[in-house]
């Protein structure tokens, strides 16, 4: 199955470079390019890609607003691009529904891997800098949970809450399985239940909820 991608960046050379790398892969097709956020939204609506590779800082409409619209519109996944590893907009981008982010100086292989991971429905929580960023922004941002923490997590069983806490630490399913001494299949069930019960799109949003509700805090390594 071919992964259909829209690449959006206001720098033509950056945009062309990413497009060339992705188009060279046998399982990836760049169906459109966009030079600003408004064009990115229009391209997604026209071409219905599987993934939008989107710069955070864009003219006309910024990447955060574009991500919010695209994520609300349908099933297209959004992978954000940023210049700095502590970009002030990263947290807002994740809240808008993005499934992860990449630094613009990403290596070729890491770019291709990230597109495949996010298009497959996973979240880009590796490398560990992603978890560090989420922890940083949630600790500095005013908590904005949709419901009081206890109420928001009350739908989860004790084991599901523990799974959520481990997700927030950036652990993979295999690592969570070892931590809880259960099978990976059981972990996948717990993760699915967490996302479904909390009405979340993916693991990135689960991490944000874990921090916002106080289930875990930055630096938690229990």
Image (cartoon, rainbow, N blue to C red):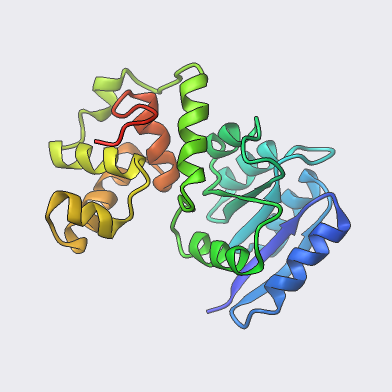
* Left or right of 214, for residue 143: right
Q: Residue at x 53, y 55 (%)?
A: 75
* Left or right of 56, for residue 164: left
Q: Is residue 152 above or below residue 126?
A: above
- Quick one: 72 or 110, which is closer to the camera? 110
**Whole-percent x and y of residue 74?**
55, 52
Q: Is residue 108 above or below residue 200?
A: below
* Left or right of 99, for residue 156: left
**Whole-percent x and y of residue 18?**
74, 64
Q: Is residue 183 above or below residue 104?
A: below
Q: Residue at x 60, y 52 (%)?
A: 79
**Whole-percent x and y of residue 120?**
47, 65
* Left or right of 128, for residue 77: right
| Residue furthest to the bottom | 26
**Whole-percent x and y of residue 96?**
57, 37
Q: Residue at x 46, y 47 (%)?
A: 128
- Quick one: 89 or 66, which is closer to the camera? 89
């Amino acid at each position: 199955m071919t992964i259909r991608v829209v690449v959006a960046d206001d720098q033509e050379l950056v945009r062309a470079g990413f497009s060339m790398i992705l188009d060279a892969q046998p399982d990836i097709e760049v169906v459109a390019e966009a030079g600003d956020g408004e064009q990115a939204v229009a391209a997604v609506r026209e071409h219905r890609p599987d993934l939008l590779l989107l710069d955070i800082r864009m003219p006309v409409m910024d990447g955060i607003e574009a991500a919010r619209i695209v994520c609300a519109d349908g099933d297209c996944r959004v992978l954000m691009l940023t210049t700095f590893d502590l970009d002030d907009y990263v947290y807002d981008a994740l809240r808008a529904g993005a499934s992860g982010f990449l630094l613009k100086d990403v290596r070729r292989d890491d770019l291709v891997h990230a597109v495949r991971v996010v298009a497959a429905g996973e979240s880009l929580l590796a490398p560990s800098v992603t978890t560090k960023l989420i922890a940083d922004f949630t600790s500095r941002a005013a908590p904005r949970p949709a419901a009081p923490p206890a109420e928001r997590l009350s739908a989860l069983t004790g084991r599901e809450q523990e799974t959520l806490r481990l997700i927030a630490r950036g652990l993979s399913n295999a690592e969570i399985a070892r931590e809880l001494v259960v099978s990976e299949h059981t972990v996948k069930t717990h993760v699915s239940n967490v996302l479904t019960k909390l009405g979340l799109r993916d693991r990135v949003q689960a991490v944000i909820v874990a921090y916002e509700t106080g289930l875990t805090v930055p630096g938690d390594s229990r």
